[in-house]
Amino acid sequence: QLVESGGGLVQTGGSLRLSCAASGRAFSSYAMGWFRQAPGKEREFLAAIRRDGSRLDYSDSVKGRFTISRDNAKNTVSLQMNSLKPEDTAVYYCAANPRASYLSTAYAYWGQGTQVTVSS
């Protein structure tokens, strides 16, 4: 089970840190990804991190502003989001899969999502 937290309302230029807590003992066996979905749009890949903590990649839309990290001892993955823009407004999801991927369809497990709203 994956549970996201940390979403909320922030002004343009502000920061938020999202966390995703995973239950179970196998967290270190899974790559983790962050995605988002805005109303009327497809789910968008943001970042992924491999089991060993190496980062797969970031989407161009967030590169340089967002940072993904994980703590296998605490069964958590985080997304630090800086310099937020109104177009970052969306529901943010974490996802887990044995292998890191850019594709949302590759991920077997998903959280329920957390809303991020960036006001202009």
Image: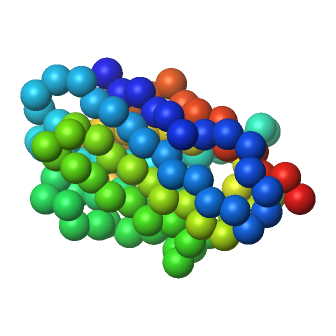
Task: Identify the residue shown where x is 58% and y is 33%.
Answer: 114
For the N terminus, give its image quadrant: top left
Q: Where is 51 relative to 23, above or below?
A: below
Residue 40 in view = yes
107 vs 92, nearest the viewer: 92
57 vs 53, nearest the viewer: 53
Residue found farthest to the right? 120
Q: Residue 98: image x %, image y %? A: 19, 42
For the C terminus, give its image quadrant: bottom right
Q: Residue 38: image x %, image y %? A: 72, 43
Q: Residue 24: image x %, image y %? A: 17, 23
Q: Where is 30 relative to 24, above or below?
A: below
Which quadrant would residue 83 be assigned to in this image? Answer: bottom right
Task: Identify the residue shown where x is 79% and y is 63%.
Answer: 12
Q: Where is 91 relative to 34, above or below?
A: above
Q: Residue 77: image x %, image y %? A: 33, 46
77 vs 32, nearest the viewer: 77
Q: Is residue 80 left or right of residue 109?
A: right
Coloration of the structure image: rainbow
